[in-house]
Every structure is written in C-alpha cells, then in structure tokens.
Image (cartoon, helix red, strand yellow):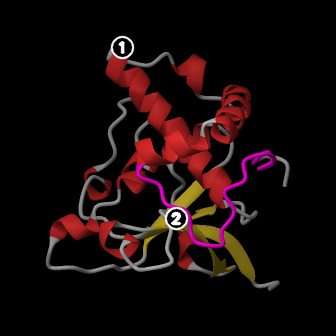
Amino acid sequence: MANEIQAVVVWCAKDKRTPGRGTFNATTVAQNDPIFDLSPLPVSTRIDCPLVMRRTGTTSPDRADLDCQIATFLAIDPRSGFAPPEWQSHIGSVIVARKDKKPLSVHHLEGFWMYNDAILDEFSENGEINESDWYSRVKFERWWNDYCEEAQENRGAFQQANGLTVTPGGSDDWSNPGNPYDL
C-alpha cells in the first residue's frame, strides 16, 4: 500500500504468548503515523540509520507482562549504555520504524537490537566504550556482515540463547537479508 510504511512490532512478554506471534513481526504504519514525529533512538542516529519507536498501548495488572527487553536495548544512550527510565521497565509492546520512512525488515530490526546488545557487552566488559570503535555507518556495516554470516550458520543456537520464536510460516532465512542502507 502506497500510504503504508513497513515497520516491526516487538512484542512484550504478555503479547508474545498470543499464538502465531514471534518475538517480533513485520507490520505497517501509516505515512502520517505520529511515530515519525518522535526523536530517533540514539545509537541508530550515530550509525546513520535513525529508528523511531513508540508503545502500542499494551496494558496488564501484572507489570512483568509489560517487559520488553529488546525495546530497552534499542533505547540505550551511546555514552552510558543505559536506557532512559521510561524505557527501562513496564514498556509493553512497541512499534519500530525508520525515521526516513524506508522499509524496516524483521532481519534489520534484529540486527539493530543485537548491535546494541554487543555495545552493552562492551560496556559490561570494559566499563566504558571507545566510541570510534562502534559509532559509524562503516563500523555497523562491518559488524552487520559478520552478524548475517553467524546468524545463518548458528541460527538454532542463537534463537534458543535469546528466547526467539519464529512466526509459523514466517521467514527465518538469513542467507540474504540485504543491507539496511541499500533500500
């Protein structure tokens, strides 16, 4: 549809329990969706592929139902490794889109999430991060190419280690996910 932009919904703990859902799924948002008025996520800006994220409005009396660690990871500050308080807990499901309104695939969203996870590993190991080692398009693309190879070769182990589920009938083929910048 010409007025729709491809995005990704990331399910919180409650919504993941709905049959037929993966950890995240492709979705669409209208070109005039308020998501595009939001400030981009900090790390995504530093690697020249700004993403925006908004809550879907999931509610639950059990706050643990609203956990969405992927959203927290996507929202981290590049200098501290911490997400702002509003993205640390009780988030609910979220929609993530590209600020430039280009299509965001499930593969690319997973890549951005795992890149932030690698950044957090660096903070964990060293207590700080050398920004020039991580925050550029060139650094991300190099990491992305390695990640795609690893994702294709070790998919089952990766899914199990990260609690990922694939939507029945969905594609989990990492042989050619494309470059997020080549759209």
Q: What's the magenta region?
A: 163-180
Q: Horizontal and vertical percent for residue 81?
A: 37, 33
Q: Is residue 80 left or right of residue 63?
A: right
Give the mark nearest the N terminus, 2 or 1.
2
Residue type at tag 1: Asn
Determine which of the numbered discs, if any, sits on residue 24 in the image: 2
- Tell me which residue sits at (81%, 47%) in the image: 176
Q: Is residue 173 magenta?
A: yes
- Magenta span: predominant SS is loop
**Which residue lies most toward the front here?**
156
Instruction: Tell me if residue 135 comes above or below residue 168 in the rendering.
Output: above
Instruction: Tell me if residue 167 comes above or below residue 120 in the rendering.
Output: below
Determine which of the numbered discs, if any, sits on residue 75 in the image: none
Residue 30 picture quarter: bottom right
Q: Residues within 10 Å of mark 1 (few under 14, many from 20)?
A: few
Q: Horizontal and vertical percent for residue 93?
A: 40, 70
Mark closer to the observer (2, 1): 2
Please name the residue that numbered disc 1 is placed on.
126
Q: Horizontal and vertical percent for residue 106?
A: 63, 59
Instruction: Tell me if residue 88 comes above or below residue 129 in the rendering.
Output: below
Q: Is residue 15 magenta?
A: no
